Image (cartoon, coloured by chain):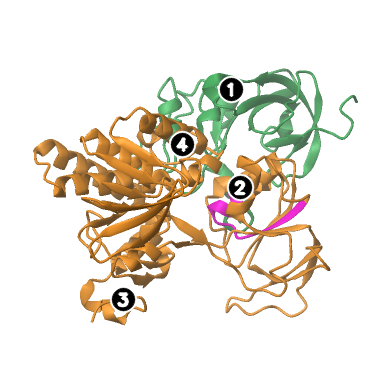
Chain colours: A green, B orange
Amino acid sequence: MLQKTGIPTSDDLKKVIPPEERLKKGPVAIVECFTKIPCNPCYHSCPVGAFNEFADINDVPKLDYNKCTGCGMCIAQCPGLAIFVVDYTFSKDRGIVRIPYEYLPLPVKGQEVIALNRAGEDVGKAIVEKVQSSPSFSKTNIIWLSVPKDQLMKVRNFRVGDNNDE
Amino acid sequence: MFIVGGGPAGLAAAIKAAEYGKKVIIVEKDFKLGGQLIKQTHRFFGSKEECAGTRGIEIAKKMQKKIKNSANIDVWREATVQGYYEDDVLTVSHENKFKKIKAGKIIIATGAAEKMLTFPNNDLPGIYGAGAVQTLMNIYGVVPGKRVLMIGSGNIGLIVSYQLLQAGVEVAGVIEAMPEIGGYLVHAAKIRRAGVPIYTGHTIKKAVGERCVQQAVICKLTQDWNQVAGSEKYIDVDTICLAVGLRPLIDLLLQAGCITTYIPELGGDIPPRDENLRTTNNKIYVAGDVAGIEEATAAILEGELAAISAVIEMGSKGDRIKGERQIIKNKLHDLRKGPVGAKIRAGLKKIRGIEHATKDRYSHIG
């Protein structure tokens, strides 16, 4: 369980994964923040007000999936790096997961990297589609990875392979 | 006003007191202001108004700038308070001089020191406190080793593990004696998805090595804290990092005759104080980790609260300053009211009055 391993269980994830109809419509944020901590930057980062206002700063964030446009402005503002954006509409068989990333060197567009799941295990290959950086992200970069659609809910990290030129 | 310690609590206190027109001296033992903030490369939690989402290093820069731009604040760097005398005189060594200070009010914000853990060979080179690892990496740009075992899964253990990974150091694992992870689970998830195993219910049995650390031996613990025979695991590492808690640095408070009392929830011996952070010596206020181990956001709020309380005590009247004090108290209350604040709340509740203080080991009463 999460409290013992640091890996969210499928029961934890059920609470934060939007319904299938919403996923089919386009990019949407997935907020993998499961315990009550005093924190609210996600609420303030959202340009469309998709996060419910915090009655208590310790509340777990609640996202209105129908208001969320998947813009990703919250990704780099979350101190826990716990927000991801997934997009099932990228192509016929592939989708995009946007991941907050704070390691160097940064990957480059088009690079093939090794996709990792929430336990840090290799789950296959991913292609870097975009590297997003901005002064407003304050050194957190957002990496857009394309992966097969059935892996969009699994891939949450990546590592650059041993041979970068592959 | 005299402030001992230039970390988040001391700097927040100085800025607030200067805003209300008080002349302030800050004494800081380091050559740089900011305390632990200058090593905190991660973003802070808390409320957006209290710099949440901002990295500790950025918060330190903002505070340093405010201090620099204030005509009311004098900073003594690389200065050490040597003693507190009966007539409320403080002595300080600064710039090769021995200075004497008699201040109107004193805010003690000396912070905390790291706790040590007892295990065989814990004096081998390669065994560090987490604070030392952060200083080496984040201030001086030096990595402590190639492969590290982290002891302790509180926020410091989890955050320093992440910083080690960012510095290109391998983290062999994080071990935690408690049955569950101590820090925020978002921090745990971040290192877990980078492949770092977290072993809850485990302890370090010993360090192994000839002249420096070569292995760590860990084992499982039962619910009654007994080691499980045969559960030993040898892990090849050249560094063992201890993140097993902090203890308030109360030495100066003891010299000043402040009552102290032992509250494990707050990290050890701490000074009882009133709701305005005044200690049992009515010249002295406390703020930050010296008053009980907590997060930097709380330290900043406590610094402001101590400063405002001292300013009021020095004769400032009016609704504005009292209103601001109430706002700060409310913010502290909100910050502590969730589940992660439960331990702090329990500790604060336990702080006993002077009537019980003779039972405490450092008390000067009688």
Question: What residue is shown at x 28% (from left), y 69% (from top)?
Answer: B257
- Between B362 and B299, the one lying in front of the other is B362
Q: Is residue A133 above or below residue B194?
A: above
Callout 3 and callout 4 share a chain: yes
- Could you tell me which chain the residue with mark 4 belongs to? B
Q: Amino acid at mark 2?
A: Gln
Quadrant of the rendered image containing residue B130: bottom right
For label 2, count other residues whose C-alpha is less than 10 Å away and answer few (under 14), some (14-19) or many (20+).
many
Give the label, 3 or 2, closer to the camera.
3
Whether residue B254 sits left or right of residue A111 in the image: it is left
Among numbered discs 3 and 4, the one appearing first in the sequence: 4
- Between B154 and B287, the one lying in front of the other is B287
Callout 2 and callout 1 share a chain: no
Q: Which residue carries the number 2 mark?
A: B134
Among numbered discs 3 and 2, the one appearing first in the sequence: 2
Q: Which residue carries the number 3 mark?
A: B363
CA–CA distance in space, label 3 to label 4: 35 Å
Question: What residue is shown at x 42% (from left), y 33% (from top)?
Answer: B64
CA–CA distance in space, label 3 to label 1: 62 Å
Quadrant of the rendered image containing residue B241: bottom right
Q: Which residue carries the number 4 mark?
A: B60
CA–CA distance in space, label 3 to label 2: 34 Å
Among numbered discs 2 and 4, the one appearing first in the sequence: 4
Q: Amino acid at mark 4?
A: Ala
Q: Amino acid at mark 3?
A: Ser
Whether residue B214 sits left or right of residue A1 in the image: it is right
Q: Measured from the top left, where is residue A46 in percent x and y? A: 44, 24
- Between B281 and B351, the one lying in front of the other is B281
Whether residue B191 sits left or right of residue B87 in the image: it is right
Question: Judging from the image, what secondary structure is the residue with disc 1 in?
Answer: loop
Magenta residues span B147-159
Point out the image quarter for the N terminus of chain A: bottom right
